[in-house]
Amino acid sequence: MIKIKTYHLSSLHPIAKYYLFCLLMLVISLSAGAQESTLTVIANPKGAPAEIKMSELKSVLMGEKQRWSNGTKVTIVLMKTSTAIGRIVSKKIYDMSADEVKGYWLKISFAGKADTPKFCNTAEELVSYVADNAGAIGILDKISSDATEVKTVTVDGKKSF
């Protein structure tokens, strides 16, 4: 029979208890931070509205709504799903894993139902693409204050969600 020695928290040295507590707090704060990331919607000044409801935003980002109210074609611009922000968008907007989002877009674009989004490697690339393409809309975790060539779209009256 194998005997396993167990340790009780009360038998640990006070310094060890302190380090264990700090490690636990770090893990909790990192996991909470990842889930609490806020997103900001940006758009080219030509096409997308200045304010949008979350339900309409999701419809646009799912490829269901393909033209803005002024007739401009919607161009979806996202961070690659392999990036941290791409994974957050996958979860918060699509309620899917990063791989499921890629599969979703392959399926509907192959079926001819919508154009595949432009996927970017960096936030700067995303901002630049949105700025250069009328009707483009993108999502970032934060927007640089010098990104004046795009507008921030409020979602349900909020600049970020």
Image (cartoon, rainbow, N blue to C red):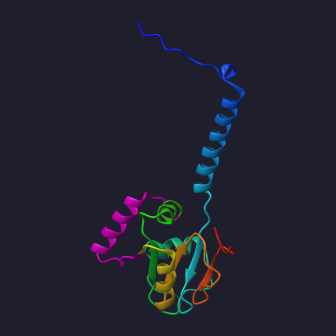
Q: Answer whether residue 57 is visible to the viewer in this image.
A: yes
Q: Quadrant of residue 12?
A: top right
Q: Nearer the viewer, residue 85 or 11?
A: 11
Q: Nearer the viewer, residue 139 or 124?
A: 124
Q: Which residues are magenta?
A: 93-119
Q: Quadrant of residue 57?
A: bottom right
Above or below, comparing residue 1 to residue 28 in the picture: above
Residue at the farthest left position: 110
Above or below, comparing residue 108 to residue 28 in the picture: below
> How many numbered marks, from 0 up?
0
Q: Is residue 96 magenta?
A: yes
Quarter that holds the N terminus: top left
User: Residue 75 location, x and y as percent?
Assistant: 44, 83
Q: Is residue 12 magenta?
A: no
Q: Nearer the viewer, residue 113 or 22?
A: 22
Q: Answer whether residue 134 is visible to the viewer in this image.
A: no
User: Residue 132 location, x and y as percent?
Assistant: 47, 91
User: Residue 116 location, x and y as percent?
Assistant: 36, 76
Residue drawn at x 53%, y 90% as measured from the top left = 47
Above or below, comparing residue 135 to residue 86 in the picture: below
Residue drawn at x 45%, y 79% as measured from the top left = 76
Residue at the farthest top position: 1
Q: Nearer the viewer, residue 43 or 69?
A: 43
Q: Quadrant of residue 141?
A: bottom right
Residue drawn at x 44%, y 58% as measured from the top left = 96
